[in-house]
Amino acid sequence: MRALAVSRDGRWSRFPDLPALSETRPDFVLTGFLGLAVPAATPRAVAERLNALVNEAIMAEPMRSRLIEFGFDPRPLDLPAIAVLVRQEREKWARYTRMAGIEAE
């Protein structure tokens, strides 16, 4: 098996000679993200505290290095930025499913 490309936006520092799909198809970036979800009724102060703790954890060593090793790009986000990310991901995947002709059953 031989890797042909990475699906992230830009090359991965772990494999700098491996091209990114976005180099030839800028609108095609497949990435994922990890997050912690809480019920909508969670008090804002609790959600903000959990968010701060998660941000602290992902930036602390050795967690940060391990995440990078596995291809993640650890970056702390505040709650509004997370909401934007989730909205963008939903829009992107809706577009991909339409392009593929996938319909809900």
Image (spheres, grey):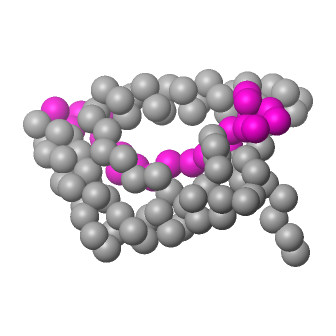
Classify residue 41 as left or right of residue 8: left
Tell me what residue is drawn at x 88 percent, y 30 percent: 101
Q: Quadrant of residue 41?
A: top left
**In the rendered picture of this protein, how many numbered marks are placed on residues?**
0
Residue 34 visible in the picture: yes
Tell me what residue is drawn at x 35 percent, y 29 percent: 81
Q: Quadrant of the image for the N terminus? A: bottom right
Q: Mainly helix, strand or loop, the magenta region?
A: loop
Which residue is at the far front?
A: 17
Expressed as whole percent of the image width and height from the top left, the position of residue 79 reads 28, 33
Residue 97 visible in the picture: no
Q: Quadrant of residue 30?
A: top right
Q: Quadrant of residue 96?
A: top right
In front of the other: 6 or 81? 6
Q: Within the magenta stretch, is there residue 88?
A: no
Expressed as whole percent of the image width and height from the top left, the position of residue 12 reads 61, 55
Above or below residue 61? Residue 20 is above
Tell me what residue is drawn at x 76 percent, y 51 percent: 19
Expressed as whole percent of the image width and height from the top left, the position of residue 69 reads 50, 69
Classify residue 97 as left or right of residue 90: right
Expressed as whole percent of the image width and height from the top left, the position of residue 34 reads 45, 52
Above or below residue 53? Residue 49 is above
Q: Within the magenta stretch, is there residue 35?
A: yes
Above or below residue 55? Residue 94 is above
Q: Quadrant of the image for the C terminus? A: top right
Part of the protein shown in magenta: 22-44
Tell me what residue is drawn at x 74 percent, y 58 percent: 18
In front of the other: 20 or 53? 20
Above or below residue 58? Residue 46 is above
